[in-house]
Image (cartoon, rainbow, N blue to C red):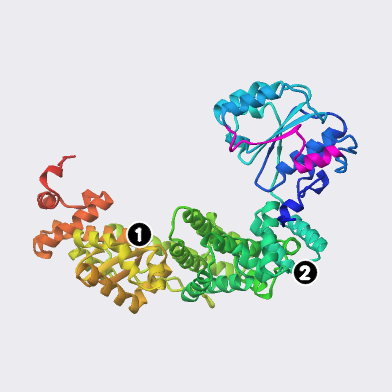
Amino acid sequence: MAYQALYRVYRSQRFQDIVGQWAITQTLRNAIATHKTSHAYLFTGPRGTGKTSAAKIFAKAINCPHQKDGEPCNECEICRSITEGRLNDVIEIDAASNNGVDEIRELRDKVKYAPTQAQYKVYIIDEVHMLSTGAFNALLKTLEEPPKSVIFILATTEPHKIPATIISRTQRFDFKKIATPEIVAHEKEILNELQIPFDEEALFVIAKAAEGGMRDALSILDQGISFGDGEVTLEAALQVTGSLSQEKLAAYLTAVLNHQVEASLEILEDILQEGKEPQRFIENVMFYLRDLLMYQQAPQLLTAQTTQVSPEFIALAQKVQPDTVYASLKVLSATQQDLRFTNQGRIYLEVTTVKLAAVATAPSITAGAAVNPSKAIVEAAPTSDTPALQQLSQEVSRLQQQVSQLTEQLHNGASSDHSIRPPAVKRSGHSNQQKPQEIPRQRVFATLEKATRENLQGIRHHWEDLLQLLQASQRAMLRACEPVAASNEALVVVFDYEILSKRAAADTDLHQAIKAGVDRLLHFAPELVAIPREAWPNLRQSFLQERKLKNANGGSQQAVPEANEEGPLAQLTEETGEEDLVPEVAKDTFVETAENFFGKEFIEITND
């Protein structure tokens, strides 16, 4: 006899054999035992959770002359013929291939005939959501008032596609995903019966990959047995599922949490070289982070669900902060969505790795702290009036004053420092927070003085080509940035995270690579000027205010050559919408320049 897959050999033959659906099976058993069955049922739920198996068991139990407590005997001729698919009174219909009106009309005509061998005729319509609208309408009346000896069982994975008029005429049972421990227990029973040795960790890997479906779990288990040459090992389970070992996941997340971007990218490269799928990689990392959080909050519950609690796992769980886990899961979830619509999964994983390192670096701030920092810090501090609490409150007050002063200076355009520096805060004791980046104000202003729209458009147009000329780590870093201004001598780039901006500013190899790449593509070699994104609006506004003061003092004609004056001003005022920053005396010059730049037919002058 030909070999049969495990999910066919070990298909449930009694209600009590169905794993993870006790409430549904108990209800059906009681209904059969008390002769209170309905004329139509709707079984919904994910694939491989027992819908079709329950329908066949129901057909056997209701027709079995020796049924006991709602369970079929599986020994009589009726039960055996239904199991083997030989009984004419139990009709299975695949709605995916029989979804037309004609098929349903034929079914409606045959319903009128009485059963030939069994007590009830049972129609099992699988994937019923595939029926057309006309087919549903043809089925509606028959489903509402079928003959006494006919029972309909509709099964579907997408109940939202079934008309409400159909659902209202059935008893609905929602099959749920099967829990991982229940899948593992069932796998153990099968392997023990087959006398096949196994690693328990391998069964957990297979159960997680099945995502709550018993049929998928048994199919993967079948592959694991074949791959392991008659033995289910952890290595075999990892290979057939495409999952990652706990050691690889621990090494990757350890590098990320230690802000070792280069090491993280190297581990990622090794993982991808092994042929791991990006989607599976993201899922494994998300599950690992979830387990870390579970271990912090309920270690006994996690230990009951898995055996994979290694020393590296415990060390990570003790180190990582819950806020970091939340932020990391948010980044991974966004990447998981993006991977559905791209063929460049490697690039997204590299960018995600850099983002995760930045998330691990950033300090955690609660929603309350964003609204009232001093209140949040005081609430988080000890309730007793300790000297440490008093000193912390003083530092918060001093920080708020310095921020107010800096904001006022920027608003008045009175700041003339060579760089915009965040207010210095005196820290008591030892602190592991990194020093904020110094913003190269004068370099940015010098670039804006000579920036042209053609240079910036050229950079943006060839940005993807430029990234392909860089190394993997450099390319991943620049995925989280955007060019905002460019001249022949310099290129201003804003980064989403300050840590990436600092690293880019200090990376001389990156500077040389960008100069060489731009020179190759656009025939000019600008120096890289890296700044955080949050600093760019203030810099842009300060530059426009300084130009406004110069023009108001009558020095605009001597301060900047006419050819370069119009480029940055026109570009920046267009981006900000702050036309009032440009003095009235310069309006005619700007109009003339705009006409020369865009063409008169595209210019409309409106006086407010």
> Which residue is at a point 23% across and 61% down the rendered structure image?
458
Residue 383 visible within the image = no
In the rendered view, tell whether residue 447 sits above or below residue 508.
Answer: above
Picture quarter with the C terminus: top left
Left or right of 459 in this view: 297: right
Q: Which is nearer the eye, 385 or 479?
A: 479
In terms of image quadrants, where is residue 487? bottom left
The residue sitting at 55% across, 28% down in the picture is 133
514 horizontally vs 100: left or right: left
Q: Is residue 90 magenta?
A: yes
Vertical relation: 260 (above or below) 592: below
In the rendered structure, does residue 316 fall within the stretch colored magenta? no
Name the front one of labels 2 and 1.
2
Q: Secondary structure at mark 2?
A: loop
Q: Nearer the viewer, residue 108 or 369?
A: 108
| Mark 1: secondary structure | helix
Q: Position of residue 4 (x, y in %)?
A: 72, 55
CA distance for labels 2 and 1:
70 Å
Q: Residue tagged by mark 2? A: 197
Q: Residues within 10 Å of mark 2 (few under 14, many from 20)?
A: some
| Residue 606: % across, % down | 16, 40
Amino acid type, label 1:
Thr
Q: Which portion, as a residue range, is magenta?
A: 77-99
